[in-house]
């Protein structure tokens, strides 16, 4: 653990002292926010990819569209909610004292429009259990009568500045929160937000450039297996290794850019659209659409609009026959 902590601390120092143009920082934090949200949802079974939510700020499909779109609307809403919760952490800051009402606020953001309003931001009042893929009970959660006191004890640990190093405290608190399982739904998402909040409170948020959720998704089986254990040692080591790998990846990415450009931080599909336009000099929307037959036209138009807004391309004409050219 000491070796991992030392290496993470070194990466933190590097990432907090590096000087990058503000626009590049904005692009990095935006991509980190999207990745964290998409992969936190993927851990819970959401199938949408990063490209699927590249237009995450665009409106949802209209209610009049086909029935088969309802599942995707739910999945997209789930990711929007995590974006909103992470933005809340980043923009509002972490309070000096993390209390139960703060956890309820995060839970309400996470489950917005996904459950009945009476269940969002509310501690469960009925028994619960955790099941495996075969629907067998693998863990009986504490009864509702014990939840409040268990959360008080946990948050006492979280807020006590004299006991544990933040990088040890964050995974320990995440594991304990999952054991308490205070909600009927959303415990994993809120537990990971609590992990992030503890790190951010102690300036270990790496300028909000770090996204550990993709690695957690890749190693989900190990992540869940270690969460199920009674001893926290291996889980803490696992989470420290995740932090080290991701902070090292980010450090390598930034240090290899000489100098970094806006284009380096485009989402994959937008970078491919840009290359298509660059290769053909002048292209129509129909030409672009033929390369992305599985992507809705609405999504592609949003991608193109964002490339235009960022100054990468320009639009010639205003009708259906409009063409696009590279500007950079």
Image (cartoon, grey):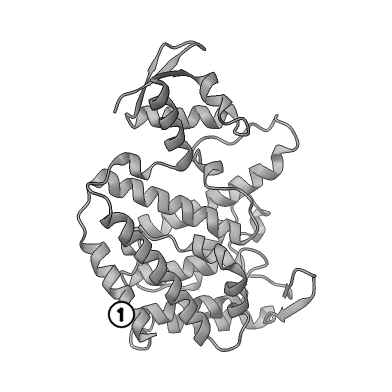
Q: Is residue 16 left or right of residue 179?
A: left
The image position of residue 134, as x and y in percent, is 80, 70
Q: Is residue 231 above or below residue 7?
A: below
Residue appearing at x 38%, y 71% in the figure: 244
Q: Is residue 126 above or below residue 301?
A: below
- Which quadrant does the N terminus fall into? bottom left
Q: Is residue 323 above or below residue 206?
A: above
- Which quadrant does the C terminus fall into? top left
- Residue receiving disc 1: 6
The image position of residue 98, as x and y in percent, is 42, 72
Q: Is residue 176 left or right of residue 323?
A: right
Residue 95's quadrant in the figure? bottom left
Residue 102 visible in rendering: no
Residue appearing at x 33%, y 56% in the figure: 253
Q: Residue furthest front?
A: 279
Q: Nearer the viewer, residue 149 or 298?
A: 298
Q: Nearer the viewer, residue 9 or 195?
A: 9
Q: Is residue 142 above or below residue 113?
A: below
The image position of residue 100, as x and y in percent, is 50, 72
Residue appearing at x 36%, y 67% in the figure: 200
Q: Nearer the viewer, residue 314 or 80?
A: 314
Total number of numbered discs in the rendering:
1
Binning the other alpha carbons within 10 Å of mark 1 as few (below 14), some (14 to 19) or many (20 upward) gives few
The image position of residue 139, as x and y in percent, is 71, 80
Q: Secondary structure at mark 1?
A: helix
Residue 224 visible in rendering: yes
Residue appearing at x 46%, y 42% in the figure: 268
């Amino acid at each position: 653990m000491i070796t991992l902590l030392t290496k993470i601390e070194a990466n933190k120092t590097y990432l907090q002292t590096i000087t990058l143009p503000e626009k590049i920082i904005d692009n990095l934090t935006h991509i980190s926010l999207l990745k964290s949200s998409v992969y936190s949802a993927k851990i819970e079974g959401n199938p949408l990819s990063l490209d699927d939510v590249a237009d995450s700020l665009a409106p949802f499909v209209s209610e009049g569209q086909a029935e088969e779109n309802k599942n995707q609307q739910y999945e997209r809403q789930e990711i929007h909610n995590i974006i909103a919760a992470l933005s809340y952490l980043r923009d509002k800051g972490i309070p000096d004292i993390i209390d139960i009402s703060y956890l309820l606020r995060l839970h309400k953001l996470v489950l917005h429009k996904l459950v009945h309003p009476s269940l969002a931001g509310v501690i469960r009042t009925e028994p619960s259990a955790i099941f495996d893929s075969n629907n067998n009970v693998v863990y009986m959660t504490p009864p509702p009568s014990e939840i409040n006191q268990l959360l008080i004890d946990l948050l006492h640990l979280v807020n006590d500045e004299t006991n544990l190093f933040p990088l040890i405290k964050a995974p320990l608190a995440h594991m304990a929160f999952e054991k308490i399982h205070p909600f009927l739904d959303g415990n994993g998402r809120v537990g990971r937000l609590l992990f992030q909040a503890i790190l951010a409170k102690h300036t270990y948020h790496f300028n909000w450039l770090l996204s550990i959720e993709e690695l957690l998704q890749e190693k989900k089986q190990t992540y869940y297996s270690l969460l199920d254990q009674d001893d926290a040692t291996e889980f803490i080591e696992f989470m420290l290794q995740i932090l080290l790998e991701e902070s090292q990846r980010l450090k390598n990415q930034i240090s290899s850019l000489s100098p970094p450009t806006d284009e380096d931080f485009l989402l994959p599909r937008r970078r491919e659209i840009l290359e298509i336009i660059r290769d053909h000099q002048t292209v129509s929307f129909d030409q672009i659409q033929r390369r992305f037959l599985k992507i809705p036209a609405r999504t592609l138009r949003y991608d193109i609009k964002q490339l235009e807004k960022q100054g990468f391309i320009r639009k010639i004409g205003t009708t259906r026959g409009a063409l696009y050219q590279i500007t950079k």
